[in-house]
Amino acid sequence: MDWKTLSWRQASPRAVQPDFARLAEACGAYGERVDDPAAVPDALKRALAENAAGRPAVLDFAVARTRLAQTREHYFTTYPQDD
């Protein structure tokens, strides 16, 4: 398949997501991975506390992988265009 025909949103199913929380820590920022939706409020409090102390913060949220329809019809019905 020609690379020009691929959508910019397509990615390999074997692609590995980096651990953004650990990358943030390696750069001197606060980093935390949040896997549980119930933990979001406390994680935000900790991140905001780090920001208040002058340290950048990165929260890496785990989300469910759901494949969206990759068609023009889906795009134009989901995101109506202003004419």
Image (cartoon, helix red, strand yellow):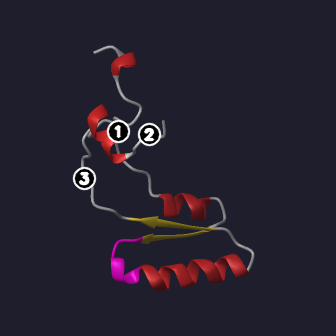
Mark 3 element type: loop
For the N terminus, the quadrant is top left
Residue at the extreme top of the image, as rendered: 2
Residue 27 seen in the figure: yes
- Answer left or right for 30 relative to 79: right
Quick check: is 33 in the magenta stretch?
A: no
Q: Residue at x 34, y 19 (%)?
A: 5
Q: Position of residue 21 (x, y in %)?
A: 50, 64
Among the two numbered marks 1 and 3 on one chain, the one whose residue lies closer to the N terminus: 3
Q: Residue at x 64, y 66 (%)?
A: 29
Asked whether the residues under the numbered discs 2 and 1 touch, taking CB atoms below 8 Å apart as contact, a structural biologist would say: yes
Q: Position of residue 26 (x, y in %)?
A: 60, 60
- Answer left or right for 70 relative to 41: left
> In the rendering, which numbered label is found on residue 76?
1
Q: Nearer the viewer, mark 1 or mark 3?
A: 1
| Segment tinted magenta in the rendering | 34-39
Among the two numbered marks 2 and 1 on one chain, the one whose residue lies closer to the N terminus: 1
Distance of label 2 from label 1 (alpha carbons): 7 Å
